Image: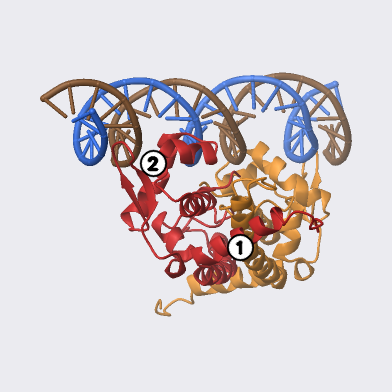
Chain colours: A orange, B red, C brown, D blue
Amino acid sequence: MKRDSRLSSVLHALLHMDAFGRPMTSDELAACLSTHPVVIRRTMAGLRDAGFVRSERGPSGGWTIACDLAAVTLLDIHAALGEPALFAVGNRSENPACLVEQAVNAALDDAFDAAEALLLQRFATVTLAALAADFRQRFARHQPLKGTPHA
Amino acid sequence: MKRDSRLSSVLHALLHMDAFGRPMTSDELAACLSTHPVVIRRTMAGLRDAGFVRSERGPSGGWTIACDLAAVTLLDIHAALGEPALFAVGNRSENPACLVEQAVNAALDDAFDAAEALLLQRFATVTLAALAADFRQRFARHQPLKGTPHA
DNA sequence: GCGAATCGTAATAACTGAAGTTACATGAAA
DNA sequence: TTTCATGTAACTTCAGTTATTACGATTCGC
């Protein structure tokens, strides 16, 4: 079952935009994510509509962050992407007439609902600012001062 | 992102087999699940290898339950299916060189690992016997005694 | 033993949804 | 006005899943 990596992708794009200092074009972002610029535009459309980024046309145009990174969480980004399904496993059918299947669905729904609640709660606790800070920390460790031994 | 419904399907099949009284052929199971008998054989192969069901060839052959339903949980069934991926959302790539992506992956992995642990824990608490009991209860409610008003 | 029923499984086809690509329209800046 | 950039529809490609076909192996009843 192939995974939807749009959440991962847009987070990646947002952190690059944050670090870039000026608007990034779809072409530049596409290069970062090794994909096609049109895919970038498609994927970012939801974030633009939600007001998390701004896109501008024409020369010196491109994508810029339009929100406070400390005020936006992974949950917000997930919502801006249209709340895609989180689970790769699910019921054969919803609202089945078969009582056997109703029993199976009820049991699975219980478990998945609990896991989904936890996952979304976790998403809500991670801000984009926290991600950016984690990136900067990794960056600092990755390029230590001259002479500092690598851990 | 289409969902993997094999877990749901095999549970459905197991409950039908449990209620059936004699071996069910792949054709009969396929009719229950509106699919193809070869798909049934493929899907049940893991459960057979794990010893949860037995298949017998020839006339009057077919599939039978070969375990104590009270001793087998959804977690065991999930394992017998090869522990397919539970999440439809995931990282763009594992072990990326890009530090931005490393930070994104770390955050997402944290959240998904927690949700996965909870989900598997839930799976471990649900036995096939509990599912069968739930089905029987639904069945009793569905065909109440004559004169009993429907709830 | 023979024939029918049934599973086992490999190979292939058909279907599906996502991603990539092309094409062209729109808007902004110099 | 030309150029750079996004917006978006249409189309193509690709990968993964499921359905189907085909045929072999095993078991039962006669």
Disc 1 residue crowd, few under 14, some 14–19, many 20+, Cα 10 Å: some
Residue B124 sits above or below residue A30 on the image: below
The N terminus of chain B: image quadrant = top right
Query: What x and y, as percent, mark residue B79?
Result: 41, 60
Query: What x and y, as percent, mark residue A124?
Result: 72, 69
All told, the count of numbered labels is 2
Q: Which residue is mark 1?
A: B134
**Relative to D9, B120 lies left or right:** left
Q: Amino acid at mark 2?
A: Arg
- SS under mark 2: helix
Q: Amino acid at mark 1?
A: Asp
- SS under mark 1: helix
**Relative to A132, B87 lies left or right:** left
Tell me the CA gap for discs 2 and 1: 26 Å
Q: Quadrant of residue D4?
A: top right
The C terminus of chain B: image quadrant = bottom right
Residue drawn at x 60%, y 68% is B111
Residue B53 can be seen in this image: yes
Residue drawn at x 55%, y 60% is B101
Q: Chain of mark 1?
A: B
| Closer to the camera in the image, B124 or D3 | B124
Residue A25 can be seen in this image: no
Q: Please check whether the numbered discs 2 and 1 fall on a single chain.
A: yes
Closer to the eye: label 2 or 1: 1
Q: Chain of mark 2?
A: B
Residue B143 sits above or below residue B28 on the image: below
Q: Which residue is mark 2?
A: B41
Query: What x and y, as percent, mark residue A62?
Result: 75, 45
Q: Quadrant of residue B150?
A: bottom right
| Closer to the camera in the image, C13 or B111 | C13
| Closer to the camera in the image, B34 or A23 | B34
